[in-house]
Image (cartoon, coloured by chain):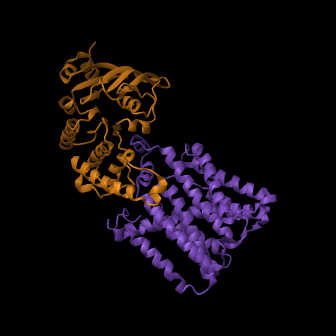
């Protein structure tokens, strides 16, 4: 059974049908990319799946269970994590604390126990600090760990978001344009990082504009255009599909 | 972080509180120190809500009023033990906070400010109008606070009670901020959508911290009532809310030291300015305006940044 199944998903904002009857499924362990011209509905699709928007129609199943319309904080419990196209880093915190927030659900969050500093809470927090530093090393940010997020460069923040998402120990990770705004060198690093994440057993769903990266690392690709599914297939199939070429470059017909 | 390093600020505060009586010449100064401590404890709670969680409350004096009047009314009219009355007041304040918080924390910015402002004003109006129980605008006397046959009275005794309460609040606030709960609070301030996606139930957290700050405000209302021995509706009014809010902002948002400094300075300032005779409110206003122009982040964060520390460790 596929890990993620999206079934006839639609949402309309007023008269704009941002996503229309989109269906696809993602098998466990794959790198699955969603591409399409600007405004094709890629981020909207992400927001639907990760609970930020509630679909007008259709169903989303994770592990066979319907999750359509579930609040985002409940989806995190089911092993879903994501990053954002326009960074959503907590600038009032250090890099390390941002990563630690990712592990929120694995901790004892009791307010009174925290105030009285129960030994278990402090101990678990110290362990978590080590785990978070390990994750920062994994994404290549070890030198930043004690720095305030507000004083980090953009490229590093992109990777910090990935580290934070990984701290949640997700089974499926949604990356919304991880390479947007990065130079060629940084994009190559993200490319490598996404591959490392996938190799560690996390299923990755990716929205990305950098075609070189997409074609390089995707096991399967979904192409959206004007909110509709244009086609789906391997990198080679998608690249050679005349509809995809037309959507990106325009056609004479 | 080593145990000593972590407890160092607590140690410093204990030493200051222990040594302070040696330099306090008379009861007038004890009185100011006590008021500083009461304000500091309320402001610590309020700063958790405003500074750390990024929410606002312009009606917090309402909760102080609930505590004060619970401690005045329940022992006088119903013969309750003062400690029981104090706890009942805190429970009532917490319950009201919890009930109204769910709907109002769906609001943001100015709307949230208006809703909390309204809440405070309603509480103040109820206190003023229910004259049968509250004595109306004239206020009412409060019974002394007795504890196991021992009655707390006089500035010197109250000083030690407040010193202990302040130490506890300081310790507990620091613990809370440096915990998964506190991290979630700061995270929802930084980015609501990101913290939701990481599993933070943001409404639950906003409600919890609002209730906690109301709880402490109410307890300090009770303490104030017993200490002064008399309550008037002024304790719950809008200006008191603004005063508390100003302490948070001047001391420094999201700064625990800032809460202490803000409460100490703004409690002392009107006393220090009393020599201006009639012009003290003007002087007070000018000082606040200058503070906001030159130190918009508040005293402690500005000074911490000035002296080359990034402020992260200085909470």
Where A237 falls versus B233 (above or below)? above
Instruction: State the image coordinates of residue A114 (x, y, percent, origin top left).
Output: 44, 57
Where B246 falls versus A52 (above or below)? below
Q: How many labels does the image show?
A: 0
Q: Residue sitting at 54 percent across and 46 percent down?
A: B108
Q: Which of B148 and A134 is in front in this view?
A: B148
Q: Residue sitting at 35 percent across and 63 percent down?
A: B310
| Picture colour for chain B | purple
Q: In the image, which lettered chain appears orange?
A: A
Specify whether A68 is left or right of B28.
Answer: left
Q: Which of B266 and A146 is in front in this view?
A: A146
Specify whether A236 is left or right of B44.
Answer: left
Q: Quadrant of the C terminus of chain B?
A: bottom left
**Going by the picture, which residue comes out furthest to the front?**
B148
Q: In the figure, residue B161 lies in which quadrant?
A: bottom right
Q: Nearer the viewer, residue B21 or A185?
A: B21
Q: In the figure, residue B7 lies in which quadrant?
A: bottom left
Instruction: State the image coordinates of residue A21 (x, y, percent, origin top left).
Output: 39, 19
Specify whether B68 is left or right of B25.
Answer: right
Instruction: State the image coordinates of residue A12 (x, y, percent, origin top left).
Output: 46, 24
Q: Quadrant of the N terminus of chain B?
A: bottom left
């Amino acid at each position: 059974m596929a890990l993620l199944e999206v079934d006839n998903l639609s949402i309309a904002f007023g008269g704009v049908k941002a996503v229309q009857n989109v269906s696809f499924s993602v098998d466990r362990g794959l790198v699955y990319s969603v591409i399409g011209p600007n405004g094709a509905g890629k981020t909207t699709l992400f927001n639907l799946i990760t609970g930020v928007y509630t679909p007008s129609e259709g169903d989303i199943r994770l592990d066979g269970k319907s999750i359509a319309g579930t609040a985002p904080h409940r989806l995190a419990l089911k092993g879903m994590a994501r990053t954002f196209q326009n960074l959503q880093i907590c600038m009032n915190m250090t890099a390390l604390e941002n990563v630690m927030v990712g592990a929120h659900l694995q901790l004892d969050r009791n307010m009174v126990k925290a105030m009285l500093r129960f030994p278990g809470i402090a101990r678990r927090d110290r362990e978590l600090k080590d785990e978070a530093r390990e994750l920062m090393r994994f994404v290549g940010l070890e030198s930043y760990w004690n720095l305030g997020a507000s004083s980090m460069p953009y490229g590093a923040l992109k990777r910090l978001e990935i580290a934070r998402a990984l701290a949640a120990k997700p089974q499926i990770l949604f990356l919304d344009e991880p390479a947007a705004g990065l130079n060629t060198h940084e994009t190559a690093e993200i490319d490598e990082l996404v591959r490392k994440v996938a190799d560690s057993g996390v299923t990755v769903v990716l929205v990305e504009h950098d075609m070189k990266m997409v074609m390089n690392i995707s096991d399967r690709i979904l192409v959206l255009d004007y909110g509709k599914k244009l086609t789906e297939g391997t990198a080679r199939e998608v690249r050679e599909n005349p509809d995809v070429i037309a959507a990106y470059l325009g056609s004479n017909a | 972080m080593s145990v000593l390093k972590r407890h160092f600020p607590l140690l410093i505060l204990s030493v200051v509180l222990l040594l302070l009586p040696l330099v306090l010449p008379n009861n007038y100064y004890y009185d100011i120190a006590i008021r500083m401590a009461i304000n500091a404890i309320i402001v610590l709670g309020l700063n958790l809500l405003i500074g750390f969680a990024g929410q606002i409350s312009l009606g917090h004096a309402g909760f102080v009023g609930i505590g004060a009047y619970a401690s005045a009314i329940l022992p006088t009219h119903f013969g309750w033990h003062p400690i029981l009355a104090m706890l009942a007041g805190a429970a009532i304040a917490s319950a009201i906070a919890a009930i109204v918080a769910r709907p109002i924390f769906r609001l943001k910015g100015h709307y949230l400010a208006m809703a909390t402002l309204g809440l405070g004003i309603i509480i103040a109006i109820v206190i003023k109008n229910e004259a049968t129980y509250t004595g109306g605008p004239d206020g009412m006397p409060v019974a002394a606070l007795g504890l196991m046959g021992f009655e707390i009275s006089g500035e010197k005794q109250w000083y030690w009670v407040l010193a202990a309460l302040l130490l506890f609040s300081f310790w507990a606030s620091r613990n809370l901020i440096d915990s998964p709960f506190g991290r979630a609070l700061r995270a929802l301030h930084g980015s609501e959508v990101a913290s939701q996606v990481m599993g933070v139930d943001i409404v639950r957290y906003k409600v919890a911290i609002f209730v906690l700050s109301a709880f402490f405000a109410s307890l300090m209302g009770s303490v104030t009532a017993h200490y002064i021995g008399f309550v008037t509706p002024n304790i719950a009014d809008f200006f008191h809310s603004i005063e508390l809010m100003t302490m948070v902002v001047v001391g420094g948002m999201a700064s625990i030291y800032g809460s202490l400094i803000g409460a100490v300075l703004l409690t002392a300032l009107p006393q220090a300015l009393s020599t201006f005779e009639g012009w003290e409110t003007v002087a007070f206003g000018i000082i606040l305006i200058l503070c906001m122009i030159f130190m918009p982040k508040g005293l402690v964060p500005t000074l911490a940044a000035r002296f080359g520390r990034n402020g992260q460790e200085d909470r």
